[in-house]
Image: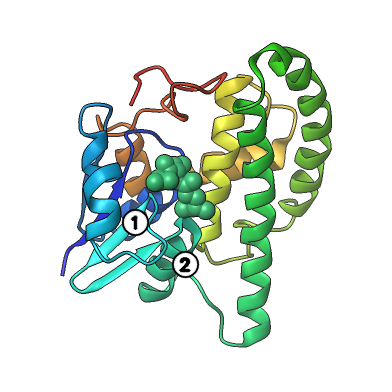
Amino acid sequence: MTILIAYWPIRGLCEYVYLALEYLEVPYERKTYTAENMNEWYKEDKYNLGLHFANLPYLVEGDFKLVQSLAILKYVGRKYGIFGGDSIEETAHQEALIEHVNDLRSRFSNLCYCDRDLFEAKKVKYFEEFGEELKKLDDWFQERKWMNGDKIFVGDFFLWHTLDVHDCMVPGILEEYPNVTRYKNEVQKIPQIDRYLKSEVYRRFNINAPWANFGCYAGL
Ligand SMILES: N[C@@H](CCC(=O)N[C@@H](CS)C(=O)NCC(=O)O)C(=O)O
């Protein structure tokens, strides 16, 4: 059964799901809602597809339907062996790593969507504090190839994406953190990921909705 992922034409809350699927080489289709067919989502599919607490992105696989980007990421990961450990403790640890990345993602998103007049000032303060986060990550990657150790897991695609959007906003921001830089390069050197990042469907700077302060070069 082919997986369908539906979302807006931005990286937003879906890129990490695409990255995991690309890495796994699992066939999937995208359904993209745009400014032109927005009502198909807001007036039809949102109410008619049988999604619980309907939202975007959503996944459909046969009769199975799922919303919430991180639930989708974990579902895909668990199904194909890149999420969940041999013990509840190991799985809990992976969950904690994902939640940590989500904290970073959510702070970045708050900056992107903050009051436009405050954006430049907030950005300066934000990146001062983000330096501390990068330092912690740099220490973390001192002895780890992937975020969870020797074995790649879905959280790596979430972290790669989160680091990359920061690098889009401030090019070169990661450079003074050698372990973070090495880690990010390792992810993008994976042949499936390399291929995807060079493909036409991947649009690096189309990160946010048009009303964000940053990261929407192609609109919805
Ligand atoms: N926590 C949810 C948030 C989903 C969300 O806010 N989706 C936005 C796009 S980023 C949306 O447009 N949802 C459609 C809607 O509210 O009808 C997730 O991670 O999937």
Q: Observer-nearest residue: 30 or 163?
A: 30
Percent across and percent down for residue 99 are 65, 59
Mark 2 Cα within 10 Å, few/some/many (few <14, many 20+)?
many
Q: Closer to the camera: disc 1 or disc 2?
A: 1
In the image, what residue occupies the spot 76% across and 21% down? 122
The answer to whether residue 194 is visible is yes
Mark 1 Cα within 10 Å, few/some/many (few <14, many 20+)?
many
> SS of the residue at dot 1?
strand
Percent across and percent down for residue 184 are 56, 41
Residue type, mark 2 in image = Lys
* Left or right placement of residue 10 versus residue 28 in this view: right
Percent across and percent down for residue 77 are 43, 68
Q: Observer-nearest residue: 16 or 69?
A: 69
Q: Are marks 1 and 2 in contact (CB under 8 Å)?
A: no
Give the colouring mode of the picture. Answer: rainbow
In the image, what residue occupies the spot 80% across and 49% down? 139
Tell me where residue 133 sits by quadrant: top right
Circle 1 is placed at which residue position?
58
Quick one: quadrant of the C terminus?
top left
Residue 74: image tag: 2
> SS of the residue at dot 2?
helix
In the image, what residue occupies the spot 66% across and 61% down? 97
Percent across and percent down for residue 191 are 34, 46
Quick one: quadrant of the N terminus?
bottom left
Between the C-alphas of marks 1 and 2, the distance is 13 Å
Q: Observer-nearest residue: 220 or 190?
A: 220
Tell me where residue 80 sits by quadrant: bottom left
* Left or right placement of residue 46 versus residue 166 in this view: left
Tell me where residue 147 sits by quadrant: bottom right
Q: Is residue 177 above or below residue 46?
A: above
